[in-house]
Each structure stands twice: as C-alpha cells, then as structure tokens.
Image (spheres, rainbow, N blue to C red):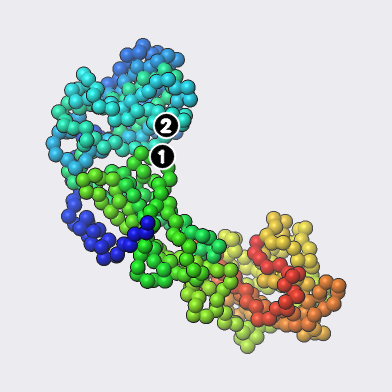
C-alpha cells in the first residue's frame, strides 16, 4: 500500500522531537574492552573442570582484545559475569545492554549457551536475555547488538549479567565492548545515510528503481520508507523498505523500490525511518535527492527536462580561427600530433598531447601496439591505446573529395577537432562524398565538475550518411 506523507507533517514531528526531548542518560557499566584480565569487578567461573586453555580468557582478535573461550572437548560450564549493577533500579525510558559478539559452533551442536540476568547478585539466574546459537544453521555469527533491559524489571540494584558457555560440541565465543546505559528520555532519532548518484539517470528499461539507505538507531529500527514525487508535484508517495541483514535490531542496509515512471520523469525522493522505542518511537527523514528516468533516445525540446541532456549548439571553430591539419595526409592511417592548450585528465591520467587520425579516432597514446587504425574495431579493448572514437571508419580527407580536418586550440578551456564533409571508403572500394561532418570537443578539467578531476569529451554530429552507420565504431576506452 502506498502512503502519502506531507512535508508539513514530517517537519512538525521532527521539530517536536528535536525540541521536546533532551537526551539524559547515565552509564551503568562503562564500556569493557577486556584489555586487562580479569577486568576489575568481573568474575570468571569454571564449573566444568576445563583446562585453563579452555576457560574464559583475554584474547587478541585482529588487533583488539576480546573475552574469549574455546571448546574443551567435553561439555563446558564456564561463566563470565559482570560486576554488580547498582544503577538499574529507578524510572527509565530504556536501558540498553550493548556488546559485540562472534560465536562459532559446529552443525552437530547439542547444547546451548546463554546470556543471563540475575536480580540477587548471581545466586539465581532467572532471566534469559539471549540464547546461542541464535540460528542453528549458521556455524559462525558475528555482529554488534543491543538488548533492551527495561522489560526485565523490577530491579533490585543487585543485578549481574552472565555470559554462560554451556556447549557440548562448540567451537569458540568472543565478546567485546560490553556497555550498559540507562536513558531517562528517548534516545535520538534514527541516523539515515544515503549516497546518491553523482549524475543521476535511471535506464528507461527498469521496471522499478531500487534505492538503499544505511539506517542505525540505539533502540533499533522498526521501519523505513522511501518517499517520492514525480516532476516536482509536491505530492509524495511512500513505499515500505525491507531490511537486508541479520542484526536483531535491524540496524544496517534497508532497500526500497520506487515504481516505474514515464520516460523523462524527474523523481525527487527522501527516506523516512522510525526507531523501535516502544513507548514513543522517534522518526527522522533525509534531505531530498533527485534522479531522471531516461529513455532510449534524447529529446531536444522542452519535454526533456534532464539537465544531463547534451548541448546541441554547434561550436563553429572555423570562424574562431581553426586551422587544417590534413593537407599532408595521403593514407587512411595518417594522423597528426597536436599539443593541447591545457592538461586534459582522462580516466585519472593527465595528457598534454592528442593524436588526431583521419579515420575519426583520437588517441592519447603515441604507440600503436597490435592496433590497425585503418580498420575500425570494437571498443574497448585492452590491446588498444587509450583514446576515443567519435565515429571511427574509413574516412577520407582530401582535396578531391572536399573533406578536411580542422583543429581549434586557441581557447584556454576548450580544444576542438572538426571532421568536415569527410568522404568514406565503402565496402567494395567506392568512395562516398560528404559522408560525415562531426566535431569532438575536449573541455578542460578546470571548468568541469567531474569525479576525479577528469575533463569532459563532447561529440556532435551535423551530418552522417546512413550507410556509414553499419561500418563504424563509436566509443571510449
């Protein structure tokens, strides 16, 4: 079911949350990293008679100290117990018990291990907080997790928590970063992170548009939506998102799909999430992002509102002082090396020279290993030099056919090559006059806004013989 969210309502809710709920908390158990052993106030019990190597101990796991225990070969009965937690009694909105764990067991596991809560200083253990393994089919499970303790009251002030390893056929159990915090008011709303596309454009053939966000919250994530409107209508519809992962608190990756929209639609979207705090959940939203639904063609009129559409204005370099470079060319493989008026970055590599070929290809490399420029080939290919083909074919620039290749290099930020009225050697050897007029522009990185500081390459066509299109290559490598 689609839900309609109004901006005014969302902003009103967020305003009330931000200004009516101050975050007030007290730390009941400071974060224990097990860098010293046994930590002050903690208790280790070996009730199963395991050798020291199979009892709770400090262990270094990828550079971090953890509390660890390994299977002894027989049923274990080993306890790792926190200090007394006197701060548990009293009113609180939530009490969070957070820890990191890595638990490994064999599929034939016959026993279970537990995290238990005692209200009488460890004499009895009446509350079961977690049971391991949580998923029998999983042999290794690792995550940060939070258990909410407020529902396990009333509290006496003599509470302790135990990690009880009680396996018959286990492997190991690691625990780290144990921390308990009491919140007197609701924790902060969910944190929503999303990386949008650098130049957003969605292919026309997709039947829905997937969007994802990474969402976390101290109390867990209850639900999330991706909300969108079409063509800046200000009427947002919201689609439920799905949590992807195994965290019990559903913190992590959430994915939702915006339904298919007509080609050339402009889609605005944002994310909306609610946490798991039962008394009064908090919500939050993100900024608004934008993408365009493309089509299998470009429209050059007011229907196409995509700002990434190509600029169709012809750049007349002849009137700006361009010069011809083809007068000395006699073969299809001829080319000229031209110094650029600026440093051009292409796939992260800086170039100061281009090599312009009569065939419609432009290279950045001065070598041609395994590369026959006279016969257009597929792009890209690892054996060919870095370059691009505006339209690579058996083109001819000569006085007899009237074709010319012009270069414009008098601008500080634009370099242009014009293939003007080029002839084309068709299959069978006949030459067709005036088969192609094309210009290639290199735009200086100094005036571009491209990832990695790269420049832009623009190819424009003024005239192309239809027969030529079946025997040419266009592309970049």
Q: Which residue is mark 1?
A: 246
Residue 252 is left or right of residue 339, and the answer is left
Q: Which residue is rendered at x = 75% and y = 75% of the image?
A: 467
- Tell me the number on the disc at residue 135: 2
Residue 117 is left or right of residue 287, and the answer is left
Marks 1/2: CA–CA distance: 10 Å
Q: Which residue is rendered at x = 13% and y = 36% of the image?
A: 90
Please, is residue 244 above or below residue 236 in the view?
above
Q: Residue 97 at x, y = what percent?
A: 27, 35
Please, is residue 51 above or below residue 206 in the view?
above
Quadrant of the rendered image containing residue 356: bottom right
177 or 319, which lies in front? 177
Quadrant of the rendered image containing residue 399: bottom right
Q: Residue 155 at x, y = what percent?
A: 16, 30
Q: Which residue is rendered at x = 77% and y = 85% of the image?
A: 402
198 or 372, which lies in front? 198
Q: Residue 347 at x, y = what percent?
A: 59, 61
Q: Quadrant of the N terminus?
A: bottom left
Q: Are marks 1 and 2 in contact (CB under 8 Å)?
A: yes
Q: Earlier in the sequence, mark 1 or mark 2?
A: 2
Q: Which residue is rendered at x = 42% and y = 17% of the image?
A: 168
Q: Quadrant of the C terminus?
A: bottom right
Farthest-out residue, left:
90
């Amino acid at each position: 079911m689609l839900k309609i969210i109004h901006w005014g309502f969302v902003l009103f809710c967020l305003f009330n949350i931000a200004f009516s709920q101050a975050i007030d908390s007290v730390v009941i158990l400071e974060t224990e990293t097990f860098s010293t052993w046994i930590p002050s106030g903690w208790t280790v019990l070996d009730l199963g008679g395991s050798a020291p190597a199979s009892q709770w101990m400090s262990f270094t796991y990828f550079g971090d100290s953890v509390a660890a225990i390994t299977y002894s070969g027989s049923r274990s009965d080993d306890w790792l117990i926190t200090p007394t937690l006197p701060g548990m009694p009293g009113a609180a909105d939530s009490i969070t018990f957070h820890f990191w764990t890595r638990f490994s067991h064999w599929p034939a596991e016959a026993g279970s291990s537990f995290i238990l809560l005692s209200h009488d200083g460890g004499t009895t253990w009446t509350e079961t907080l977690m049971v391991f393994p949580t998923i029998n089919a999983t042999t290794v499970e690792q995550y940060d997790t939070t258990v909410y303790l407020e529902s396990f009251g009333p509290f006496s002030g003599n509470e302790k928590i135990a990690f009880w390893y009680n396996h018959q056929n286990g492997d190991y159990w690691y625990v780290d970063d144990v921390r308990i915090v009491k919140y007197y008011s609701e924790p902060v709303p969910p944190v929503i992170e999303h990386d949008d596309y650098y130049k957003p454009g969605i292919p026309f053939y997709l039947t829905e548009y997937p969007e994802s966000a990474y969402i976390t919250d101290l109390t867990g994530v209850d639900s999330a939506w991706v909300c969108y409107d079409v063509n800046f209508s200000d009427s947002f519809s919201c689609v439920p998102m799905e949590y992807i992962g195994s965290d019990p608190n559903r913190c992590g990756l959430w994915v939702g799909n915006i339904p298919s929209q007509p080609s050339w639609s402009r889609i605005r979207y944002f994310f909306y999430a609610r946490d798991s705090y039962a008394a009064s959940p908090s919500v939050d939203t993100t900024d608004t992002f934008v993408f365009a639904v493309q089509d299998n063609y470009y429209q050059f009129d007011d229907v196409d509102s995509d700002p990434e559409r190509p600029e169709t204005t012809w750049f007349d370099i002849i009137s700006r002082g361009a010069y011809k470079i083809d007068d000395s060319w006699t073969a299809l493989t001829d080319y000229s090396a031209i110094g650029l008026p600026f440093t051009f970055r292409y796939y992260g590599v800086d170039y100061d020279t281009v090599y312009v070929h009569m065939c419609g290809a432009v290279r950045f490399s001065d070598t041609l290993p395994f590369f026959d420029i006279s016969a257009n080939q597929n792009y890209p290919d690892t054996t060919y030099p870095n370059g691009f083909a505006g339209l690579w074919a058996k083109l001819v620039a000569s006085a007899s056919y009237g074709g010319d290749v012009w270069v414009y290099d008098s601008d500080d930020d634009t370099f242009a090559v014009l293939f003007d009225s080029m002839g084309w050697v068709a299959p069978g050897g006949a030459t067709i006059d005036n088969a192609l007029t094309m210009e290639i522009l290199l735009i200086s990185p100094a005036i571009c806004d491209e990832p990695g500081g790269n420049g832009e390459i623009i190819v424009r066509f003024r005239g192309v013989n239809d027969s030529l299109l079946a025997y040419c290559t266009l592309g970049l490598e």
